[in-house]
């Protein structure tokens, strides 16, 4: 794959993570717009998942009103009585079902290592799905940036960080989370969002490894050429 | 592997070709120009920001705070690492809990990090209210929530009906008056309704009408030689569990312990004597103990006095001439004997209590022989009953008889402390408020049938559970706007179904709490509350070990989600919104809670929360205001320690200087007589008529002395053969552990109980006759309700009774708390069985000897 194609692909991946993150916030007037953008990004990043987004989009056609969605959003992700699909890593990765566990601390440590902290206005746990999706997006764009600066070492670093974060965090619990959403969601919107998330992340787990492998292959080849 | 990768990239490339083609086409159509693919997209993140400072290195620190997992109110330290609370231990600086802890404080960690907590303000979108109406809550901003609340309050003010505002209080700190008292008064309502009478007000009744002390006692257990405990379980669920648990090994070594309770409690399991009494007859046992002590001449003469000639005239059945006895620090011992004790022999008591006469005699003699180091420890069991006020008196009166009152090794009151009341609201109450406040309270206290005489003043004690009937019947009027915090009356009151209907009837209800409960289900707005131990500014005071401590709560961690402090931040924010609507009295009032250190007035909710705490505790930390106890060099110094300790207990200082009418310990209660006569006079009737109306048996002079009354129990024995025994868990006492995994993992620390189950404990003799085995699902039914749970055969319950721990049976409250959320409770709520009846003299809601039940296999 040439550099330009790879950049297109990487950008689409980064955008998809970011837009998925946005979709797991409380629905508002901008939700419709985000779905359109998500569909666009997925055309490149994971067209297989785009079919579900098309379903999402059609679920939002006809004068979009976020209010009815908020009821389901609350039941799935907020409460107040019992959350059908807790959007927190620690709930899936640790026992008993609690927040702010050791895995949460590990996620925080990884954000800090990347020079980030939880935004002041964001009042939720650090392993909330929106944070983990945004963090993946951040790492992808850092890799693209490194690439455009021809900093291969940094690029590999960000790819490795993606791989490790995906394997230890987001990727380790998201499918279970998505199952919970699919099991409980009554609206087409959250059904489709969950399926999209699953389809994209399943593919992206492989993508990270593939990109990393090709980058390493390129570096090795480059090194071989140099040594000659 | 390589082939797989090649396929992966081939697919990606194919996808890209496709998407690029269509994307370019669409982009061109949209913009008419080319679009740069790649680096042009710079996302703006909503959850992450560039790190502003160097993070901690994982080194933790201990931060002082307070546990309110029960009413012990222990001073604690929390170990915080990188902003996360990871451990809890007793604060070694407290002289009340001496560094000790109990399991409840650890459960707090699972409460603060409970994924089911309320995270953000929410509003109901389904206007229909009822058990079967899903509220359909949606997240809203604090701004929207507060705007709505302020609008509703202003509506009442504009219509001159501020009395239709109501504030309901559950678990509180001493910051409570800001929200509970000052805000309610300044808005203009008489309706601040506390939870106190569903807790243990009847426990205070006996001590008040004998020794003028309306509060919980502390017990000098380390110097005691006999500890006689009535329906209290100090190792599990009474006050100062941490302290008593820490020293109990020594106490057992020095004193004899006798526990009167129909089930084998944690304390009974380690006692010398277990007296599994027939529920409701504690007064008979106490009468026989008093009778025996007098007959055997074992009363403490230095406190009570003696016959002038030294000859004991207390002969069973004989009337004694009061003139022959010279009393010292007590009032009316002979009248007490004549009216209530002379025929109360051990044999008489054995018939009623179902206890062997021999055991009663042994306990009475040994207790009397241990005078004055002989504690009579009154818990909720015998007194939170329909006629429990008098049982409270007679059980507590034993402390007077043996001179344990205010004495070494005896029953003690509170040490002095020096916190300050918040500023008075009067000058901020306008005409509307003054008129509004004069209305009758919604709980109907003070009516002929509800004397509720707290500290001698009729109509002064809350009758929490009756507020539901007040609301339901619009009697005295309808409630239109209500705010409630840290309470769950739809679960924690007897016959809670009445509360479901009452709350459904309130047009606008706000609930401030940590976990959405059965009460929240009927609310219009939910506000996320902070967890008291980790996220709140506040203080509480409590007594134990001969000391009183004032222990602080401080935000040891950043509050989770958008939670705010119930008693300070939220009322401030409401006050700001009321000001925006032209009513600034409340905010002006709050602005006078100045920071004593800087003289600054608070300008926002956070400052208000801190300044009001510094204001209330200034005498403890400001060296210039020092009045006694621990001395500190300033606010930071106190905050670091987290706790202030009083001076040691001044023994015997209250002898003949009590806050009773006679200043003595009153066996004949002139204080109660005056209070009852005052109430009768108010209703133009006699004391006898009042007592009859309120279901007491005493008539005439008997009403003024501690005495035995037969229990008043719901349900016919032929239809409902078993007496229901409710008790509390060492893992919650109250209900806020119901969504903690550890609560279920360790439920078997309550004697007879089982992990991950809610069991009714039945004596094997009874169970076998019904063919019931351990593990059988059963239904308990009383005249007022029915629950299902699991049978557990256990010798630790008296035959003829069935004992079940309170705490489970939630149909909401979180994923763990309910079995099938909103539909099937996990276990059963005891209160579904218990009728809404009262000890009307104290206003207490009854939960013991309250009802009979039948048991069926399901």
Image: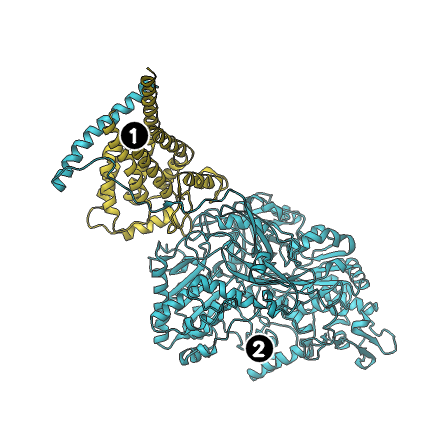
Chain colours: A yellow, B cyan
Q: Same chain for the residues at labels 1 and 2, yes or no?
A: no
User: Within 10 angstroms of label 2, few (less than 14), some, or many (20 or more) residues?
Assistant: many
Position above or below: B813 against B447: above
Position above or below: B820 against A223: below
Looking at the image, residue A166 sits to the left or right of residue B702; the answer is left
Nearer the observer, B179 or B252: B179
Residue B385: image location, x then y, percent: 61, 65
Chain under disc 1: A
Nearer the observer, B858 or B195: B195
Q: Which residue is mark 2?
A: B458
**Marks 1 & 2, CB-CB < 8 Å contact:** no
Disc 2 secondary structure class: loop
Position above or below: A206 against B29: above
Viewer can see residue B120: yes
Quadrant of the drawing holding the N terminus of chain A? top left
Viewer can see residue B757: no
Quadrant of the drawing holding the C terminus of chain A? top left
User: Which quarter of the figure has residue B147?
Assistant: bottom left
Residue B518: image location, x then y, percent: 45, 56
Looking at the image, residue B752 sits to the left or right of residue B342; the answer is left
Position above or below: A53 against B817: above
Residue B85: image location, x then y, percent: 52, 48
Point out which mark residue A150 bears: 1
Disc 1 secondary structure class: loop
Looking at the image, residue B91 sits to the left or right of residue B508; the answer is right
Point out which mark residue A101 bears: none
Residue B826: image location, x then y, percent: 50, 48
């Amino acid at each position: 794959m040439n550099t330009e194609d790879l950049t297109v692909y990487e950008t689409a991946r980064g955008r998809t993570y970011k837009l998925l993150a946005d979709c797991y916030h409380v629905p508002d007037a901008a939700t419709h717009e985000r779905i359109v953008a998500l569909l666009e990004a997925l055309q490149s990043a994971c067209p297989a998942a785009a079919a579900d987004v098309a379903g999402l989009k059609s679920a939002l056609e006809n004068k979009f009103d976020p209010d009815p969605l908020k009821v389901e959003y609350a039941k799935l992700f907020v409460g107040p009585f019992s959350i059908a699909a807790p959007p927190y890593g620690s709930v899936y990765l640790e026992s008993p079902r609690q927040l702010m566990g050791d895995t949460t601390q590990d996620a925080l440590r990884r954000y800090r290592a990347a020079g980030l902290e939880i935004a002041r206005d964001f009042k939720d746990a650090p392993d909330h799905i929106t944070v983990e999706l945004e963090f993946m997006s951040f790492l992808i764009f850092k890799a693209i940036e490194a690439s455009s600066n021809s900093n291969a070492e940094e690029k590999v670093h960000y790819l490795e960080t993606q791989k490790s974060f995906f394997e230890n965090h987001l990727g380790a619990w998201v499918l279970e989370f998505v199952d919970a959403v699919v099991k409980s969601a009554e609206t087409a919107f959250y059904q489709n969002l969950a399926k999209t998330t699953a389809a994209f992340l399943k593919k992206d787990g492989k993508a990270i490894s593939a990109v990393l492998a090709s980058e390493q292959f390129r570096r090795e080849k480059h090194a071989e050429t140099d040594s000659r | 592997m390589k082939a797989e990768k090649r396929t992966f990239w081939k697919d990606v490339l194919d996808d890209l070709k496709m998407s690029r083609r269509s994307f370019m086409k669409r982009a061109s159509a949209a913009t008419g120009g080319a679009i740069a693919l790649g680096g042009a997209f710079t996302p703006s993140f909503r959850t992450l920001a560039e790190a502003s400072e160097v993070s901690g290195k994982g080194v933790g620190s201990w931060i002082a705070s307070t546990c309110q997992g029960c009413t012990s109110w222990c001073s604690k330290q929390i170990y915080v690492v990188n902003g996360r609370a990871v451990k809890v231990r007793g604060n070694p600086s407290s002289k009340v809990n001496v560094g000790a802890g109990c399991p409840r404080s650890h459960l707090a960690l699972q409460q603060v990090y409970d994924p089911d907590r309320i995270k953000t303000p929410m509003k109901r979108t389904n206007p229909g209210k009822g058990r079967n109406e899903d509220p359909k809550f949606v997240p809203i901003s604090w701004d929207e929530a507060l705007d709505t609340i302020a609008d509703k309050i202003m509506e009442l003010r504009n219509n001159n009906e501020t009395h239709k505002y109501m504030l309901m209080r559950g678990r509180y700190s001493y910051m409570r008056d800001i929200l509970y008292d000052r805000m309610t008064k300044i808005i203009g309502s008489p309706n601040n309704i506390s939870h106190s009478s569903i807790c243990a007000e009847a426990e205070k009744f006996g001590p008040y009408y004998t020794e003028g002390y309306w509060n919980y006692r502390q017990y000098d257990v380390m110097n005691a030689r006999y500890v006689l405990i009535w329906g209290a379980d100090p190792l599990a669920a009474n006050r100062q569990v941490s302290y008593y648990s820490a020293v109990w090994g020594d106490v057992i070594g020095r004193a004899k312990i006798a526990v009167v309770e129909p089930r084998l409690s944690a304390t009974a399991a380690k006692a010398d004597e277990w007296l599994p009494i027939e529920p409701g007859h504690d007064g008979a046992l106490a009468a026989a103990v008093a009778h025996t002590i007098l007959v055997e001449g074992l009363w403490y003469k230095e406190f009570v006095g003696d016959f002038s000639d030294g000859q004991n005239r207390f002969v069973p059945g004989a009337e004694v001439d009061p003139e022959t006895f010279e009393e010292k620090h007590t009032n009316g011992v002979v009248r007490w004997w004549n009216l209530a004790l002379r025929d109360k022999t051990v044999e008489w008591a054995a018939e009623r209590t179902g206890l062997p006469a021999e055991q009663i005699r042994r306990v009475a003699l040994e207790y009397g022989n241990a005078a004055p180091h002989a504690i009579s420890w009154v818990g909720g069991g015998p007194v939170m009953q329909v006629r429990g006020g008098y049982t409270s008196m007679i059980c507590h009166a034993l402390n007077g008889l043996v001179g344990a009152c205010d004495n070494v090794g005896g029953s003690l009151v509170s040490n002095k402390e020096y916190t300050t009341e918040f500023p008075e609201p009067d000058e901020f109450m306008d005409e509307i408020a003054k008129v509004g406040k004069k209305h009758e309270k919604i709980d109907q206290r003070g009516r002929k049938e509800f004397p509720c005489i707290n500290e001698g003043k009729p109509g002064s004690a809350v009758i929490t559970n009756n507020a539901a009937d007040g609301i339901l019947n619009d009697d005295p009027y309808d409630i239109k706007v209500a705010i409630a915090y840290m309470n769950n009356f739809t679960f924690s009151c007897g016959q809670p179904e009445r509360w479901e209907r009452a709350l459904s009837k309130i047009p606008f209800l706000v609930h401030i709490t940590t976990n959405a409960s059965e009460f929240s289900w009927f609310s219009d707005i939910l506000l996320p509350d902070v967890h008291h131990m980790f996220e709140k500014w506040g203080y509480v005071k409590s007594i134990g070990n001969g000391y009183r401590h004032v222990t602080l709560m401080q935000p040891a961690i950043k509050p989770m989600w958008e939670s705010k402090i119930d008693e300070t931040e939220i009322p401030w924010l409401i006050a700001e919104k009321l000001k925006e609507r032209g009513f600034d009295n409340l905010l002006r009032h709050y602005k006078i809670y100045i920071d004593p250190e800087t003289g600054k007035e608070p300008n926002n909710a956070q400052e208000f929360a801190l300044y009001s705490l510094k204001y209330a505790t200034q005498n403890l930390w400001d060296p210039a205001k020092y009045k006694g106890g621990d001395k500190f060099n300033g606010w930071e110094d106190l905050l670091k320690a987290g706790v202030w300790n009083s001076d040691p207990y001044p023994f015997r200082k209250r002898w003949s200087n009590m806050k009773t009418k006679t200043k003595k310990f009153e066996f004949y209660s002139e204080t109660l007589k005056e209070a009852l006569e005052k109430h009768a006079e108010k209703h133009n009737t006699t004391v006898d008529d009042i007592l009859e109306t309120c279901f007491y048996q005493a008539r005439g002079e008997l009403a003024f002395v501690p005495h035995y009354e037969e229990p008043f129990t719901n349900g016919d024995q032929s239809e409902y053969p078993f007496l229901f025994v409710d008790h509390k868990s060492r893992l919650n006492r109250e209900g806020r552990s119901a969504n903690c995994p550890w609560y279920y993992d360790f439920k078997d620390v309550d004697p007879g109980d089982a992990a991950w189950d809610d069991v009714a404990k039945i004596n094997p003799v009874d169970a076998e006759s019904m063919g019931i085995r351990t593990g059988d699902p059963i239904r308990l039914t009383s005249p007022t309700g029915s629950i299902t749970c699991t049978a557990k055969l256990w010798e630790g319950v008296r035959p003829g009774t069935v004992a079940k721990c309170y705490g489970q049976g939630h149909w909401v409250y979180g994923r763990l708390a309910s079995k099938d959320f909103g539909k099937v409770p996990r276990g059963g709520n005891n209160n579904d069985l218990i009728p809404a009846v009262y000890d009307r003299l104290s206003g207490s809601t009854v939960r013991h000897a309250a009802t009979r039940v039948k048991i069926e296999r399901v």
